Amino acid sequence: MLDYGFTPIVYLGTTDRQTPFIYYTSVNAFNYFRKYRKRGKNKPYVYIDIAPNENGMLDCFLFNAPLMKQISIVAVFKDPR
């Protein structure tokens, strides 16, 4: 639901909802904010590619979390599948 100009993601983080992750949906914001960040540079963050893939779904890339197998997201989705 990024088409309508508001932020549809309420929470993106660990499954116990104790650690929220920073997420980026723009390549420019991703490059700019990661480049000049001094504190929390090694904390997990997520890049969401808003261009649909061949299945019509969005791809998310999780960085700085090598042992994490599951994440939790609370958001408004256009297609609830």
Image (spheres, helix red, strand yellow):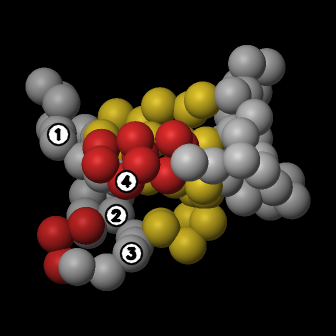
The amino acid pointed to by label 2 is Phe
Which of the 4 quarters of the picture holds residue 4?
A: bottom left
Residue 8 image offset from top left, x and y in percent: 40, 73
Label 3 CA crowd tier, 10 Å (few <14, some 14–19, many 20+): few
Task: Describe the element under mark 4 as helix, strand or loop.
Answer: helix
Q: How far is the residue under mark 4 from the one under mark 3?
A: 15 Å
- The structure residue drawn at horizontal position 42% and vertical position 49%, both measured from the top left corner, is 32
Give whichever of discs 3 and 1 has the lower sequence position.
3
Residue 5 image offset from top left, x and y in percent: 22, 79
The amino acid pointed to by label 3 is Thr
Task: Describe the element under mark 1 as helix, strand or loop.
Answer: loop
In this rendering, position of residue 3 left or right of residue 79: left
Give whichever of discs 2 and 4 has the lower sequence position.
4
The amino acid pointed to by label 4 is Ala
**Residue picked out by circle 3:** 7
Label 4 CA crowd tier, 10 Å (few <14, some 14–19, many 20+): few
Task: Describe the element under mark 2 as helix, strand or loop.
Answer: loop
**Residue picked out by circle 1:** 52
* Disc number lying in front (3 or 1): 3
Residue 20 image offset from top left, x and y in percent: 72, 58
